[in-house]
Image: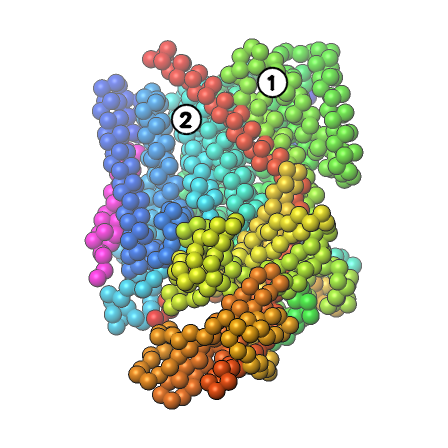
Amino acid sequence: MKTIHIIGIVIVAVAIGIVISTAEDASAYVSFEEAKNIAINNDDKKIHVVGELQKDPAGHVTGIQTSPDKLSFTFMMVDEKGEAQQVYYNEPIPTDFTKSEKVVVVGNYQDNTFVASKILLKCPSKYQENELKEI
Amino acid sequence: MIHDLIGDFFGHLFVIIAFVASIFSAISYYMSVGKPLDENLFWKRWGRTFFYVHGASVIAIVGTLFLIIYNHYFEYHYAWSHSSKHLPVEYMISCFWEGQEGSFLLWAFWHVVLGVVVMNTNRFWEGPVMTVFALVQAFLASMILGVVIPGIEYKIGSSPFILMRDAMDAPIFQTNPNFIPEDGTGLNALLQNYWMVIHPPTLFLGYAAMLVPFSYCIAGLWLKKFKEWVGPAIPWTIFSSAILGLGILMGGYWAYETLSFGGYWNWDPVENAVYVPWLVGVASLHTMILFRSNATALKLSIILTIASFILILYSTFMTRSGVLGDASVHSFTDLGLSGQLLIYLVFFTVWSIALSVVRWKEIPSTQKELSTYTKEFWVFIGAAVLCLMGFQVLVPTSIPVYNSFMGLFGIDSNIAPPADPVVYYSKFQLWFAAAVAIISGIGQFFFWKNLDKAGFIKAVLPSLMLTLIVSALGIVLSGIGEISFIVLLTAAIFLIISNLNVLIKILKKNPKLSGGAIAHIGIAMVLIGILFSSGYSTVISLNNSGLKFSDSKDFNNENLLLFVNDPVKMQEFELTYQGDFVEDRQYRSYFNKTDLEYTNNLYKVVAKANLKDNGTTLYKKGDTLEIYPENTYYKIQYKNESGGTFSLYPRAQINEGMGGLLASPDIKRFASRDLYTHISSIPNPEEPVNWSEQEEVTAKIGEKFFINDYVAVLDSINPVQTIEGVTLNEGDIAIKAMVRIMGEIKDYYVEPVFIIKDKMAGRIGDEVSDLAFKITLLHVHPDTNEFTFGIQTRQKNWIVMKALEKPMINILWIGTLVLMFGFTVSFVRRFTEFLKSRNTTS
């Protein structure tokens, strides 16, 4: 066998390894219930949960609590299956947090709280304004 | 009046001409290929003419769009959504790349420039090369066409010249079709930065330049001149690798300076989308150079050249079709171009692959056994590792594409990108980088001399010994312990030493050949800089106050809460938040907001005290000055243990459009490290302020009194004639009290107003925001010459900030410059070679 063939085999092997490791390391979009099951199985893998902030019938966001030193906060989030869950975030509250349409939290369950390491907000207008404000 | 002539008519017209001319140019150039001389010249002349018409139209489109933005024609959607009346002219250029249409335009513009250069430097290859160019231009022009195909109602492209009334469905246009918005919505604040004026054009130039080697490669396959295309293509591969690399690093520098995620690289899909083609482009550069020196690796060069261009198209598709959606914070929104982008991608992919397959058997290749002790082996392995390095990034970045693809078949795929991209990508890329460094270090020994096993060992040993000594020293001094970091550091040092070794020899013989060695040293420095500044970036704003909110886990907060004028300890520093500042337009100095009185015009303020910067008075009390009201700068004074001080001014702005608080860091640069500080949170301006019960104090003119433990003086009482927002009639009286308060670090001036209007008393209070109180002039006692003030307090102003330390980041920036210098030397050499060979053959 020529050297070039050995190199070729090694390259293909590494490429396959990359694909497999990606599949293993990839996160997933799940519901809170599934996230809880993952945590129960002692898997501390971080996952994505998509949902909305909990709102009262009048449409006001409820359930946000800021720590006394303003350095962290918890909030209530309702996932796409309708399950509400308290989420803890160890960063100051993002300014337009309450205006977000959709929230994606990345993190995992620690005890009974979902601890987010990252929060992605989908705001009504982000890069392209499509509402014309009346003057 | 709607200015419909400039854009709606001329703008659209230019776009259509640009599109049609590029198609005609492509056809003419296509016809010229393989024709007898006179026919060839005839078609080429037409191709050239159409390309110039196309180029002129693209420039006219750019000019028209610029005029629309410059003249604030907000009846055009592009101007309205990307600009505003107060946007400084230098940032109007940035409007071009905030929107998708403008950035397609920029890309097309660079292709025009490069096309004209290529066409005029190389007549032999003109026909086939320019066919590819003109075709690419036709695709790009179609993206901004904005024409609806009648019958099927399919809109091709999105025009930058669309009028507001056609762009949106607002009810106002039904009642008044000629309605023009007063002001635009403005340019994204993050783009209002000088790096954002030069970073996107640089990046797009790099993108555009990748087309040149690709076109030569296609031309070579087409004309069956399999070997000849490499010579003229090499300088362009160097050029595109250099410019794209520079663009990427500039983007990193911009992110470091402007965004507050605490770094320069975030492994965001948009960043990955340029990183991958760059790696493959660099790999192709190396195999092409190898081919020039000993006629091997031709097939590999062809594959890699095609791959890097296809990857550019794939990146364009990913970042602009909206497929990334949730996965990226800064991809463009979908403009309905995904279909067109896909056709663009598929067209060139299918064409280039089909052409290569058809010609594959005819491409000459050497059947030599690949020995470990040859430069071919090392270049080959190096290129392979670079490609795998790119592949490792490409696979996870493509997860959203995979999800959408599965969605087409009705399969709901829930794979998400890695939860922590920085940790995830770094753990792989680090090893690849170390491998690349070692391979290119070893490759250097073979590149300049044929060595056998014994010769190689003899040559490499001194460098290896020196590497181990330097690296051991570095490890001990810096105290790094992580195995992967030790390996990368050693590999990078080996790369520097082996290249220095080569460099010294080359410089003696022929300095023109030194480009490669210099570039490699630059890359090694970049790696070392990244290793330390990212690997050992530490949060130093740790909150050790013991305040804990959540008891479920022991969290260590990485932010600090600072109240105004209350010093807080942070490592060796004592930090004091000293108030909110704004920047003036004339001197670009920062002034405390409490020294400024706001007027009806947001952009103009009046000085309440003499305003100084560095001891010189820039504005006198009462002067009006223009400011940039959007940004607030939070002054944070750092005092070290020996008493030395410096101040940082991280800025923040509340920006609804961008979803909240936009914070940009301020950086204190030391030779060995950067101290990076940014704002994490500020009080919500929409939240109502809780003022305390009013307390009263009475004072005479010139008398000192206490307000909340601060000494205050009533300097004077002055009658005033005009008060903003109040109409004073005959018999009305207004007076203003001038109160000076001696704060911890400066004096504050408050001017509460007392009005008697229509025999009714009115009071306008004044606030000292730094000291968190408000003073109202309550009563005037003419009998005793005394004045009574009401004082209310609130919670003091606060900020939450984060500070990080980035060791040795300067090595990264210096390495970037060294790398660019190496590329330049190398480009000059290859370009002279190309000119020489062109002039001897013709």
Amino acid at pointer 1: Leu
The residue drawn where x is 33% and y is 48% is: B144
Q: Nearer the viewer, residue A9 or B123?
A: B123
Q: Is residue A12 visible?
A: no
* Image coordinates for residue A101, horizontal then vertical, percent: 52, 67
**What's the magenta region?**
B1-28
The residue drawn where x is 25% and y is 36% is: B53
Image height of B569 relative to B768, above or below: above
Element under disc 2? helix
Q: For marks 1 and 2, give the one nearer the viewer.
A: 1
Image height of B638 relative to B168, above or below: above
From the image, give the main secondary structure of the stretch colored magenta.
helix
Element under disc 1? helix
Q: Give the residue pinned by disc 1.
A: B503
Sequence-wise, the earlier of marks 1 and 2 is: 2
Crowding at label 1, few (<14), some or many (≥20) Cα neighbours within 10 Å? many
